[in-house]
Amino acid sequence: MNERIMFGIARLLRGWAKIKFRLLGHATIEDINGDKFKEVISALQSQGWRVTSRYFNFDAGIDYDCIRMRRGFATLKCEWDNWSEWSIEGSRTIIEKIAAENALTVTHAWRWSAYDPAGGNET
């Protein structure tokens, strides 16, 4: 497959992810440093959130990390990379509540939108 087709497919997949993010009414808290993230996760677990999956590949905590949490039917996706630290993504109302409780900033854009060459840094 040539490069042009691959970039076209990647653009379609990123576009679909952004549309899905908006349709689901999601929001993101970005740029959470490690110590603050540990505090937030601890608080979430004390509120009944439980870890349902964790990224356990060879590069976990080096290049990438991911924790998924659930409480009832609600889910959170926590991702880390060594450029932008931790983020938490989920339902807008839940994310806004977590941000308010922890003095964090909410964005209404998909975490990876900032890396989209076509733009898409909606807030």
Image: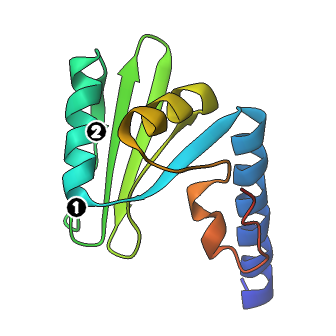
Q: What element carries label 1?
A: loop
Residue neighbourhood size for the residue with mark 2, other residues' Cα within 10 Å, grouped as few (<14), some (14–19), many (≥20): some
Q: In the rendered structure, which amino acid carries the disc numbered 2?
A: Val
Residue nearest the viewer, comparing 54 with 37: 37
- Eye-nearest disc, 2 or 1: 2
Up/down of 83 relative to 21, above or below:
below
Percent coordinates x, y for residue 80 in the rendering: 35, 60
Residue placed under numbered mark 2 in the picture = 40
* Quadrant of the snapshot with the N terminus: bottom right
Percent coordinates x, y for residue 20 in the rendering: 73, 42
Up/down of 32 relative to 96, above or below:
below
Residue placed under numbered mark 1 in the picture = 60
Residue neighbourhood size for the residue with mark 1, other residues' Cα within 10 Å, grouped as few (<14), some (14–19), many (≥20): some
- For the point 67% across and 53% down, which residue is it? 109
Up/down of 80 relative to 63, above or below:
above
- For the point 26% across and 37% down, which residue is it? 41
Q: In the rendered structure, which amino acid carries the disc numbered 1?
A: Ala
Residue nearest the viewer, comparing 51 with 6: 51
Task: Name the disc covering residue 42, or none.
Answer: none
